[in-house]
Image (cartoon, helix red, strand yellow):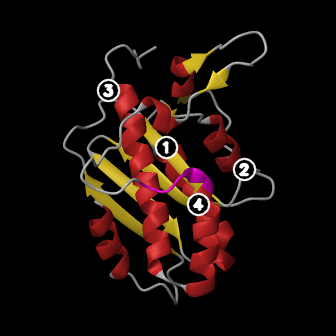
């Protein structure tokens, strides 16, 4: 998958009128209702940081939208906001309050899957949320592990400095893995996503 992403990115021209890349992949195992939304950002603060990647799974499609020009951010944000609003509901995500805050879509159509994976260790340790990597398996076992989400801002900065598409590949591959991991949670039989 990672090599395919890099090949697909390499076909795109990153300069001129195109301020984002869009990629589409077919899934063997479709999502039966709603959609999965995942974003990658330059940091954790929706007031000062920016969305750089939007990933969506709906039915048997995995869609990626990747910002390529920082100076076109508000056009990209507007595109992301409109695209997510058009998707079938409910919108599934892992800690999807993050997505809701960045996209400014603060409605009741989000279904947060983190609620299924909280553990209270003891009185001294507050309830800890497992990370998505803690509760799922790597979706592409014969490929390298994707970067950690905390490395996305650094990859973005390296891309902006060098324009080397390998940094976009790393970000997009991480997003694709997160989307697949989130779908694994939905597919687990003990989670009833229709509630």
**Vertical position of residue 18 compared to residue 147: above or below:** below
- Residue 180, image x and y in percent? 36, 43
Any mark on residue 116, and which? Answer: none
| Tag 1 residue | 37
Mark nearer the viewer, 1 or 4: 4
Residue 68 located left or right of residue 142: right
**Vertical position of residue 109 compared to residue 98: above or below:** above
In primary-sequence order, the first of circles 1 and 2 is 1
Regarding mark 2 in the picture, which secondary structure is present there?
Answer: loop
In primary-sequence order, the first of circles 2 and 4 is 2
Residue lying at 57% horizontally and 78% vertically, measured from the top left: 159
Residue lying at 53% horizontally and 34% vertically, measured from the top left: 94
Regarding mark 1 in the picture, which secondary structure is present there?
Answer: strand
Mark nearer the viewer, 1 or 2: 2
Cα separation between marks 1 and 2: 17 Å
Mainly helix, strand or loop, the magenta region?
loop
Regarding mark 3 in the picture, which secondary structure is present there?
Answer: helix
Mark nearer the viewer, 2 or 4: 4
In primary-sequence order, the first of circles 2 and 3 is 2
In primary-sequence order, the first of circles 3 and 4 is 4
Cα separation between marks 2 and 3: 28 Å
Cα separation between marks 1 and 4: 17 Å
| Tag 4 residue | 152
Quadrant housing the N terminus: bottom left
| Tag 2 residue | 44
Residue 81 visible in the picture: no
């Amino acid at each position: 998958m990672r090599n395919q992403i890099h090949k697909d990115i390499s076909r795109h021209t990153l300069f001129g009128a195109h301020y984002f890349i869009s990629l589409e992949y077919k899934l063997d195992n479709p999502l039966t209702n709603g959609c999965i939304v995942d974003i990658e950002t330059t940091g954790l603060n929706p007031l000062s940081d920016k969305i750089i990647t939007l990933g969506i799974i709906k039915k048997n499609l995995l869609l990626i939208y990747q910002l390529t020009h920082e100076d076109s951010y508000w056009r990209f944000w507007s595109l992301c906001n409109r695209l997510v609003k058009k998707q079938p509901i409910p919108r599934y995500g892992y800690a999807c309050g993050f997505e809701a805050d960045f996209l400014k879509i603060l409605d009741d159509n989000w279904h947060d899957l983190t609620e299924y994976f909280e553990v209270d260790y003891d009185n001294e340790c507050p309830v800890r949320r497992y990370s998505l990597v803690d509760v799922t398996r790597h979706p592409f076992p014969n490929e390298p592990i994707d970067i950690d989400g905390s490395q996305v801002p650094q990859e973005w900065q390296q891309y902006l400095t060098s324009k080397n598409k390998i940094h976009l590949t790393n970000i997009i591959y991480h997003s694709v893995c997160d989307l697949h991991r989130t779908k694994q949670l939905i597919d687990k039989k003990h989670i009833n996503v229709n509630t």
